[in-house]
Image (cartoon, grey):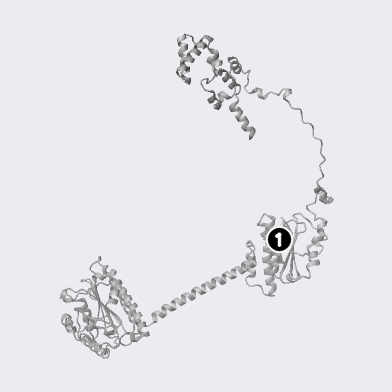
Amino acid sequence: MVVKCPRCVQRVHRAAVQCPHCGFSVHDADRAFGAQEVRLQCLTDAAGVLRRRERETARRLLEEFQHKFPQLFFAVYFGTFRELPSLRQFGFWLLNRGAFEDVEVSRPNEAGVLLSVDVGGKSAGISFGYALQPYLDDDITFRALSAAHPYFLQEQYLKAMEVVVERLGKTLRRQARRAQRDPESFDSSEGPGSDGAGDTLERIRANHRSKELKL
Amino acid sequence: MKWGWVIVSSCLIIPSDGFGQEQEVAEPDQERVPASSAEEKDGEKSDEKDQDDGNDGGDQVSETEARKESGSAPPEVPEEALADSAGPEVGPTRRMVDLSPVDFWPRLPVWSSEDVGKLKRGEIVPGAGLLLELPEEFVLPPDPEPEPTPVPRTPLEDLLPPPDPEDLVEEDPTVVQARFLEPYFGQRPANFLVDPQEMLSRQQYRDREKFLEYHAGDSEVNLYIYLFDTEQQLPTEFTIEGVFEEHFARSGSTALVFYYLGAPERSEMVLSEDIRAVVSQEKQDRARHTAIQEALEKSDFCYQLDNFSVELSIRLYWFEKEMGSPGRVEPGGEDLLARQEGVPAAGLPRTESKAMRYLGNAVWGVLLLAMAAVLVWVGRVVARRRLRYVFPEVEVEPLLGAPHAAGVGAVISFASAQLPPSQQRDQVPDYLQRM
């Protein structure tokens, strides 16, 4: 399990408060995108690339993912960023500051997978929470994005999204079976983490009810 | 072989007449040149021989020159002689192997102007001599008549039995010969098909008999068919009812038919008492009529018999069904009988029904298998859809001060359609890009 810094893409050791290479932390992301939590849904088409029917299809797809993985959720964000410092940093920030309204409270952001697509900058990235850190990595997410690459090129964003969800879902199914067979193969000594997740999420969502931030 | 070689050798060595003439003209100068010239030539020749030994060509040249010098013209040779002496310049050795037809064969006759005139007038017909009768001296005496040799008597005639006087008498086609009455009606037949007159060939008989045996093995009602010729009339003392009473009355369910080959409409049928007790006379008549109709569908008398027996077998099958359930008609049996009135019989009924039953079972089996496969597939799909994947609890320490997520996956660009995804993978630190 290798964690990379969202800014310098260097490896970060366990429990590092900031990147030992570039000093990046969540506060840097807050400064770039805002320190307030944002309310959004699993499918956010801020760029307006999906038709209504396509949005419905995409929502059904995300619901199926949640149905299949009762602990997880999948979120997709289509946006157009004029001066985006980094799509990787944006994904990192959104998964930490986002409050997904259509996701049950039992599925914290630690168990979320976020596909963020910069339609204007023609790039796409994947971020995931702490709960999925043992099961996903840079290569796995790259393979999923590579499979969807032709559809991104043709601007078939729904199809690209379907491919990414399907690929990651397939990988996660396999990893879940492996984890059920041999839980110790996935290092669980990463320290505490999920204890306060529920509290954090509740705090985030409570905060979202009073404030709204539009991206 | 030896003689052939001698003949060829003689042709090559011994000259024919022509060759003899050539020998005579082989040295024409010696004979036809005058003596004085010859002497001069001899003298000159001897001189020249002294000068040039063995030069034959030189001799001839010298001879010509000598003639020119002596002023003696060469003697006139008649054309016939010249013609006979064709090729006098050729040496004898060369002539020995020259077998050209001109030299070897006698010359062809030559048409004289007189003959040509006769030919034009039609007095001569070419080749007419070949058509003339031979003179008596060339006619061979007639062969003496051969003395008659005693021919041994063919034993076959002795072996054959003397012809039956009844055979010599022309048979009446409407009468069953008396000698067949005993095989017909003398005892209960051993086979289902009775044909003592052998109107069917052995193979035809065997095929029909086999079918009737099959029917008997498959049905409770035995079917006996007596074959008669088209116009034959039975003696009055032999009726089908009498025959049935005599031979079949105590042999269980039986159908007896007198069938007339080529005239199926003359057929007669009698059923045993147990059948008649259940099946009405109308149905019996209908069965016979239907069988006759089926037979008349064919023109060949053998095929007529086939159709007749097959259709009757079907009818007897339904009679048997009717007998099996007294007071109750087989469901669909009446309808089937009525429906088959105008329908030609198709094959063997029992075989068909069994085949249909097997086919139906097979179809049902395949359908059940297909349904089972579909059910299994649907079950698997449903099970997979209902399957949930749960991850074990994993405790991860927060990183970079992030409360929920620090997992950073890949970032890929899709700006270029020419570059592969691996070359558009974003792994460059942000501070080297736009920050």
Please state which of residues B43 and B386 is positioned toward the viewer in this rendering: B43
| Secondary element at image label 1 | helix
Residue B401 spot, x, y in % from top left? 20, 86
Q: Quadrant of the N terminus of chain B?
A: top right
Left or right of B18 in this view: A206 = left
Residue A9 at x, y percent in the picture? 21, 78
Q: Is residue B377 visible?
A: yes
Residue B338 image point, x, y percent: 64, 66
Q: Quadrant of residue A15?
A: bottom left
Q: Is residue B138 left or right of residue B148?
A: left
Toward which corner of the image does residue B300 lie, by quadrant? bottom right
Occupied quadrant, residue A144 = bottom left
Which residue is more in the foreground, B93 or A212? B93
For the image, the number of numbered tags is 1
Mark 1: few/some/many CA within 10 Å (<14, 14-19, 20+): few
Q: Is residue A29 above or below residue B245?
A: below
Can residue B107 be seen here? The reply is no
Give residue B358's position: percent from left, percent from top.
59, 70
Judged from this view, the residue extending furthest toward the front is B50
Left or right: residue B255 versus residue A78 is right
Where does label 1 land, which residue? B206
Q: Quadrant of the C terminus of chain B?
A: bottom left
- Front residue (pair B332, A47): A47
Q: Identify the chain of the residue marked 1, using the numbered disc in the image.
A: B
Residue at x 44% of width, y 76% of height: B377
Location of residue A108 with respect to B173 vertically, above or below: below
Q: Amino acid at mark 1?
A: Arg
